[in-house]
Image (cartoon, helix red, strand yellow):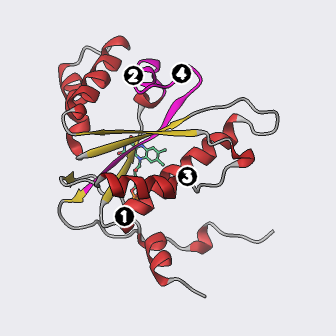
Amino acid sequence: MMNHDVLKALTERVSHGSLEAPGPSSEEVDLITRAAMRAPDHALLRPWRFVVTEGDRRGDLGVVLHESLRLRGVTDEAQLAKALKAPLRAPMIVAVMLDYKAHPKVDRTEQVGSAAAATYAMSLAANALGYGTMWRTGQYATDPHVIEALGGSAQDEVIGFLYIGTRKGPSKNIPELDPGDFLTHF
Ligand SMILES: Cc1cc2nc3c(=O)[nH]c(=O)nc-3n(C[C@H](O)[C@H](O)[C@H](O)COP(=O)(O)O)c2cc1C
């Protein structure tokens, strides 16, 4: 049986950089997280953690990003000011963190793949609830200062900062891609 809603969500997804309040309720966050936790996961390591930032805490996250730049020697005032305001681009940011677990059969690449799949599932679920999303990373994602502030350890990283909120303005056009350009048969 074909589920047209699911196929439409998959084939027509686009990112939304421009987002405003309201963001998801705590019940919706629960549902979105349930979708993420069904990502494929070799040996069921659950190699992810989800850290939600919303409300006034977004300003505190901005301070963490600002400090991340400063610690890396950035002195450009415009760049520093942009970091402070970066988390204000959506009412909610979910940092999907790789919670890496050493395993004899499941290497880091597989665990990153699983956490990335969780990020995508989270994004699709948020879109299904009517919100827009944008997946961001940048150098913050692997900066120990940022990872530690989010409760991670030295071997962890941020797989995605998923910005979630109410779409402001129309969705951008879906790019025309031809499957034949990417698909071959062995
Ligand atoms: C791992 C990952 C990291 C990304 N980081 C950023 C980022 O830091 N800034 C950004 O503008 N887009 C980033 N993107 C891309 C956007 O999320 C988005 O996919 C891209 O703008 C294409 O738009 P579309 O998703 O509507 O096709 C990232 C995507 C992925 C998968």
Are circles 4 and 3 on residues that touch, CB within 8 Å? no
Evaluate if marks 2 and 4 touch, with contact meaning CB atoms under 8 Å apart: no
Do the residues bearing badges 4 and 1 touch, measured as CB atoms within 8 Å? no
Question: Disc 3 or 1, which lies upstream in sequence?
Answer: 3
Write down the residue under mark 2: 149
Element on which disc 4 rests:
loop
Q: Earlier in the sequence, mark 4 or mark 1?
A: 1
Disc 1 secondary structure class = helix
Label 3 neighbour load within 10 Å: few <14, some 14-19, many 20+: many
**Residue that appears at 74% across and 36% down:** 107
Residues tagged 3 and 2 counted as in contact (Cβ below 8 A): no
The residue positioned 35% from the left and 19% from the top of the image is: 68
Task: Say what secondary structure mark 2 lies in.
Answer: helix
Q: Which residue is mark 1?
A: 127
Magenta span: 142-165
Q: Nearer the viewer, mark 3 or mark 2?
A: 3
**For residue 26, side relative to residue 82 (left or right):** right
Q: Are there few (<14), some (14-19), or many (20+) residues within 10 Å of tag 1?
A: many
Amino acid type at image mark 3: Met
Eyeballing the image, is 82 above or below 117?
Answer: above
Q: Position of residue 49 (x, y in %)?
A: 51, 38
Determine which residue is flagged by label 3.
37
Drawn side of residue 131 relative to residue 149, left or right: left
- Say left or right for 49 vs 105: left
